[in-house]
């Protein structure tokens, strides 16, 4: 499995190590070389210094056709943009963007990106520990809509997708808007 | 018209001012408190000192009733997110993004931003228009690649201006056969005198290109001397 991780912070580096140890192909990007110090010396993947929102940089790093693409930088907007480049231009199969803003997290889930909201995750963890009511929002919002060139296929797209990340992948979705409802959660329609 | 401007840099500042002068309702969002205060001091209480990428603050700024959202910060990813949130979360009918990296234009369009303004592209276009064309333009390759169809745009100072093909030292195997003058194509006869601004169409062996270049455009030194 080919995994691309943008942002080599604590989370990014830990996941990179995990995927690498599990025998997967891993490419990590960060704008700072120093960030790669977080990777263990045994790390067998590729570490590339560069901007993960830049399509050319991602291509040069070999990020095309990733099975898993994780946007985990400090910036919500950078993550959202990086994830959308991966989904729309680079043919990534499963894309997750880390966000701090809960509203953006749910909005982009509606737009067909899987989003991970750190704020919800932490507040729920604290509330649960203290026995207070939790929001119950999942840590990762599975995409409820379809990501298709930004045109939000409102009701039908949301209704037809459940939570299975193993839906039919690429190859079926090149026909244009008519097929957008078929793209399962976690996979993204790829345009030619 | 209610316009929500995000980003209080030079562009956002002048845009807000102009819109107010033209009688529109405007709210400007600028996350830097000092900069926001500075603008508010001058143009009044239309400034909200919060991050326009954050959904909560977009809502407070009235994004849900905005006719237009203009994202003009210096960061492309911020402008993208502002426009996408405006469009999909607040149902804004028209979104405008400033794009700094021209390579992002296609992506932004694809992702549903209505209008894209690229200052970089505009300046680049303007500069490229002014660059004198010193090169031969390759129109086509013929005869299995051994022949080349070439266009030369004659500038002032070209050795060919004021002369006819018969006066020039045209390499063997080359033919100057047509000229485009004032948008009209006409045959270029051995006695036709060429003028500045003419586009001369030639066909010739690929290896004659340097000689043709010298005859029609001039050598690099003469071009620089102009």
Image (spheres, rainbow, N blue to C red):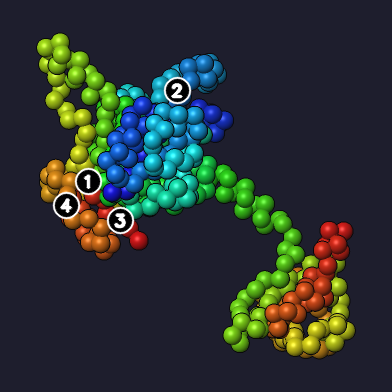
Answer yes or no: is residue B18 visible: no
Position of residue A154 in the picture relative to residue B103 (left or right): left
Foreground label between 2 and 1: 1
Quadrant hosting residue B196:
bottom right
User: The N terminus of chain B appears in which quarter of the rendering?
Assistant: top left
Calculate the distance from the C-alpha at mark 2 to the C-alpha at mark 4. 41 Å
Calculate the distance from the C-alpha at mark 3 to the C-alpha at mark 2. 35 Å
Answer yes or no: is residue B127 visible: yes
The residue pinned by badge 3 equals: A190
Say which element carries label 1: loop
Looking at the rendered structure, which numbered label has been put on residue A167? 4
Residues indicated by labels 2 and 4 sit on the same polypeptide chain: no
Task: Mark 4 or mark 3: name the one nearer the start of the chain.
Answer: 4
Calculate the distance from the C-alpha at mark 4 to the C-alpha at mark 3. 14 Å
- In contact (CB < 8 Å): disc 1 and disc 4: yes
Task: Mark 1 or mark 4: name the one nearer the start of the chain.
Answer: 4
Calculate the distance from the C-alpha at mark 2 to the C-alpha at mark 1. 33 Å
The residue pinned by badge 2 equals: B31
Task: Give the residue displayed 26% in from the left and 46% down from the top.
Answer: A94
């Amino acid at each position: 499995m080919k995994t691309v991780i943008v942002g080599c912070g604590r989370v990014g580096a830990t996941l990179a190590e995990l995927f690498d140890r599990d025998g997967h192909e891993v490419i990590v990007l960060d704008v700072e070389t120093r960030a790669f110090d977080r990777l263990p010396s045994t790390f067998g993947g590729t570490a590339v210094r560069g901007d993960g929102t830049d399509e050319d940089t991602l291509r040069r790093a070999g990020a095309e056709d990733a099975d898993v693409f994780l946007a985990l930088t400090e910036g919500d907007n950078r993550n959202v943009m990086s994830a959308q480049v991966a989904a729309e231009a680079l043919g990534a199969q499963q894309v997750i963007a880390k966000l701090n803003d809960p509203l953006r997290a749910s909005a982009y889930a509606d737009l067909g990106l899987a989003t991970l909201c750190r704020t919800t995750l932490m507040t729920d963890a604290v509330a649960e520990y203290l026995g207070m009511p939790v929001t119950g929002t999942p840590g990762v919002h599975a995409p409820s809509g379809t990501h298709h060139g930004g045109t939000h296929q409102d009701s039908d797209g949301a209704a037809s997708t459940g939570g299975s990340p193993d839906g039919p992948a690429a190859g079926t979705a090149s026909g244009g808007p008519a097929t957008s409802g078929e793209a399962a959660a976690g996979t993204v329609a790829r345009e030619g | 018209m209610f316009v929500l401007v995000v980003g209080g840099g030079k562009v956002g500042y002048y845009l807000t001012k102009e819109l107010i002068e033209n009688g529109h309702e405007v709210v400007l969002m600028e996350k830097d408190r000092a900069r926001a205060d500075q603008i508010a001091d001058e143009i009044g209480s239309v400034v909200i000192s919060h991050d326009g990428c954050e959904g909560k603050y977009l809502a407070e700024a009235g994004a849900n009733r905005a006719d237009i959202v203009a994202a003009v910060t210096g960061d492309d990813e911020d402008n993208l997110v502002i426009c996408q949130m405006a469009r999909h979360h607040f149902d804004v009918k028209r979104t405008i993004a400033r794009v700094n990296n021209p390579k992002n234009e296609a992506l932004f369009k694809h992702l549903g931003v209505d209008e894209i303004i690229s200052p970089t592209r505009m300046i680049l276009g303007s500069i490229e228009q002014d660059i004198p064309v010193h090169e031969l333009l390759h129109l086509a390759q013929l005869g299995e690649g051994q022949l080349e169809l070439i266009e030369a745009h004659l500038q002032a100072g070209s050795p060919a201006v004021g002369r006819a093909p018969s006066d020039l030292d045209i390499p063997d195997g080359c033919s100057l056969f047509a000229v485009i003058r004032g948008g009209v194509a006409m045959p270029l006869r051995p006695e036709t005198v060429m003028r500045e601004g003419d586009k001369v169409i030639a066909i010739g062996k690929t290896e004659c290109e340097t000689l043709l270049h010298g005859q029609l455009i001039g050598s690099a030194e003469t071009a620089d001397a102009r």
